């Protein structure tokens, strides 16, 4: 291949490379500043030298001589073209190669970084998804929790609460954001709460748990168990409080009910003992009045003694009613007058109603006596009248009407008041044990706030009436008043049973028998002995159970009258000893007591409850003697 051809090929290649480098330089201007311009200049000079070669060869081929183009000049031109080109090319390569290497490294790093960013983006997306899911779980738990949650800022108030918290206090979430814990806390419990929160802010404790009372929006009291923890910021100060509140109102009511029941049992025990002593006193007066009235007396003296006898009988009835409220005896159903029960009960309540300014209206119909426990029915009436009196507090018109009447085969007892009335939502819970709207359960500002209620009165009332086979019905209108209607079946027949005080004339006394009276009250022993002595019985009395056993062992008695409450050996111990020596039950035992306990072990013995009438005592003793002799 000729030199000309080679020169032409070289020129074409250099032109192509120069053009490529020029285009690359335009696309990567940032890299051309690092060496591409030198490289491009070098290739341009090489191209210039090659063109000169081609020109020279072409001229020589045509025997054409360029003027002034001496061999020396031609050499210098080629030297400039080739030497300058290679020099520029060398400088360009020296500056370009490190740049290309750096660029490749940067590109490699960029590719790796891009991959890493993708991986990080995926990981971040997964983490954010987990966070969102976790937040949703927390939000769901916060929303659906069975206890109230709150977040509050010190010196400001609630910033977030859950639905249960709103439900517990009766406020909307928006309304609570304008309140703080102090606004909801009962005034009497605020000091303890404020001191506890102050200790958290001072760093003495991290959190606290305490029980306190809250006031709901409707003014009712909520007993809550609250747990609070302070969350501190970077400055060490409490940034906000996290807390939860558990509603323990029902638990608190149950605990209070137990305490009240225990207190009531203690009071009942005391009242039972007091009633027993009053019955002994009433018994002595009653029997002695009976003995005095058997004598020849001036009409004025007799009238006064008869008045005194009625007063003692009324006193005995009131004491018996008091004893029935202690629930210290079994139900004793006998033929009783409903109207008499009403009169006796109102005698107890009259002072309280008068002091309260209550107008009492009594309408008694012609209701014949029927079988009931007069003490329990008196308790029912007392519960209803006391509730009516409470309902009249703060009312302009204060009137209670009590009415008795016959309704078919039932007796009807109504207690009507002009009080505040009972809301419909409360009527269905009225007879539930421990349900009450009094005291701390009353609406804020209500007159019931200062009235103590156990929540047992109406539940006991309902149970007593059901036990008698009757019913209780309530009609009430808020702001108008309330009517309680009680129906009782008028069962007339009464079977002979221990303690039933039968009416009628005394039967002929049996043949004289030996009787011993065992009672620690001497005056009572003397009065009973005198009454029995009118029938020519041989009567012995003692206040010592051991002495009675000794006398019984020497010569058995026909009838033994035993009081249950005595010092040294009490009536129960004496009964146990007598049962061991009286296996044939030839000696008849009659329990004479002013307090009949709930004890089934006494069921086999006849019981006479103090105070009793003289004629009733003679009837029971006579009947016992006839059983013993077979008459």
Image (tube, rainbow, N blue to C red):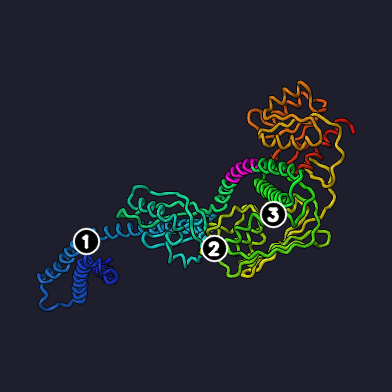
Q: Which of marks 3 and 1 is in front?
A: 3
Mark 2 touches mark 1? (CB < 8 Å): no
Q: Name the residue under label 3.
A: 344
Quarter-of-image position of residue 589: top right
Residue drawn at x 70%, y 57% is 343
Which dot marks residue 586? none
Q: Is mark 2 on a helix, strand or loop?
A: helix
Residue 428 shown in magenta: no
Tag shown at residue 447: 2
Q: Mark 1 points at which residue?
A: 93
Q: Dot 1: what SS?
A: helix
Q: In which quarter of the image is the N terminus?
A: bottom left
Q: Residue at x 69, y 33 (%)?
A: 519
* Magenta-colored segment: predominant secondary structure: helix
Q: In the image, is residue 557 above or below residue 57?
A: above
Residue 277 sits above or below residue 349 on the image = above
Mark 2 or mark 1: name the one nearer the start of the chain. 1
Give the camera-side residue of 624 and 87: 624
Between residues 398 and 458, which one lies in front from this camera angle?
Answer: 398
Name which of mark 3 and mark 1 comes first in the sequence. 1
Q: Where is residue 523 in the image (x, y as percent from the top left)?
A: 67, 36
Residue 295, given in percent of the width and then of the height, sits at 76, 43
From the viewer's perspective, is residue 171 above or below residue 317? below
């Amino acid at each position: 291949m000729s030199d000309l051809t080679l020169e032409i090929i070289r020129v074409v290649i250099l032109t192509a490379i120069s053009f490529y480098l020029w285009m690359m330089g335009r696309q990567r201007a940032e890299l051309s500043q690092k060496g591409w311009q030198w490289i491009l200049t070098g290739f341009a000079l090489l191209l210039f030298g090659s063109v000169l070669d081609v020109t020279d060869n072409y001229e020589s081929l045509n025997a054409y001589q360029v003027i002034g183009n001496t061999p020396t000049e031609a050499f210098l031109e080629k030297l400039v073209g080739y030497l300058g080109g290679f020099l520029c090319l060398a400088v360009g390569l020296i500056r370009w190669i490190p740049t290309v290497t750096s660029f490749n490294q940067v590109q490699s790093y960029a590719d790796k970084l891009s991959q890493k960013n993708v991986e990080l983006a995926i990981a971040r997306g997964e983490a954010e998804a987990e966070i969102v899911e976790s937040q949703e779980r927390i939000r769901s738990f916060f929303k659906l929790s069975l206890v109230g949650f709150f977040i509050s800022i010190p010196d400001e108030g609630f910033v977030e609460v859950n639905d249960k918290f709103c439900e517990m206090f009766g406020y909307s979430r928006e309304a609570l954001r304008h309140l703080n814990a102090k606004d909801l806390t009962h005034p009497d419990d605020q000091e303890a709460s404020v001191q506890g929160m102050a200790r958290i802010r001072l760093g003495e404790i991290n959190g606290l748990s305490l029980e306190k009372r809250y006031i709901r929006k409707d003014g009712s009291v909520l007993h809550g168990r609250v747990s609070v923890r302070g969350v501190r910021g970077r400055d060490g100060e409490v940034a906000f409080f996290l807390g939860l509140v558990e509603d323990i109102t029902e638990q608190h009511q149950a605990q209070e009910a137990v305490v009240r029941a225990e207190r009531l049992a203690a009071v009942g025990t005391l009242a039972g003992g007091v009633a027993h002593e009053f019955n002994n006193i009433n018994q002595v007066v009653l029997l002695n009045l009976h003995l005095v009235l058997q004598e020849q007396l001036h009409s004025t003296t007799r009238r006064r003694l008869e008045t005194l006898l009625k007063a003692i009988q009324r006193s005995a009835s009131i004491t018996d009613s008091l004893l029935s409220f202690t629930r210290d005896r079994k139900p004793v159903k006998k033929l009783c007058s409903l109207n008499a029960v009403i009169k006796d009960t109102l005698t107890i309540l009259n002072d309280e109603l008068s002091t309260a300014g209550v107008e009492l209206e009594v309408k008694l119909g012609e209701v014949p006596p029927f079988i009931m426990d007069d003490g329990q029915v008196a308790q029912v009436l007392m519960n209803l009248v006391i509730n009516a009196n409470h309902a009249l507090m703060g009312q302009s018109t204060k009137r209670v009407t009590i009415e008795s009447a016959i309704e078919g085969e039932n007796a009807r007892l109504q207690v009507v008041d002009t009080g505040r009335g009972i809301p419909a939502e409360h009527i269905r819970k009225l007879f539930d044990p421990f349900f009450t709207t009094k005291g701390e359960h009353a609406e804020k500002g209500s007159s019931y706030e200062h009235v103590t209620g156990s929540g047992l009165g109406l539940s006991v009332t309902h149970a007593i009436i059901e036990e008698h086979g009757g019913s209780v019905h309530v009609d009430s209108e808020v702001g108008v008043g309330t009517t309680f209607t009680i129906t009782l079946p008028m069962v007339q027949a009464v079977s002979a049973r221990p303690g039933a005080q039968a009416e009628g004339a005394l039967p002929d006394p049996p043949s004289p028998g030996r009787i011993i009276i065992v009672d620690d009250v001497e005056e009572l022993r003397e009065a009973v002995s005198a009454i029995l002595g009118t029938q020519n019985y041989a009567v012995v009395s003692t206040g010592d159970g051991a002495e009675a056993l000794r006398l019984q062992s020497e010569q058995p008695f026909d009838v033994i009258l035993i009081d249950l409450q005595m010092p040294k050996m009490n009536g129960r111990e004496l009964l146990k000893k007598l049962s061991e020596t009286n296996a044939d039950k030839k000696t008849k035992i009659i329990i004479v007591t002013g307090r009949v306990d709930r004890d089934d072990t006494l069921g086999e013995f006849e019981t006479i409850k103090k105070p009793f009438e003289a004629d009733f005592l003679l009837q029971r003793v006579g009947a016992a003697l006839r059983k013993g002799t077979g008459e």
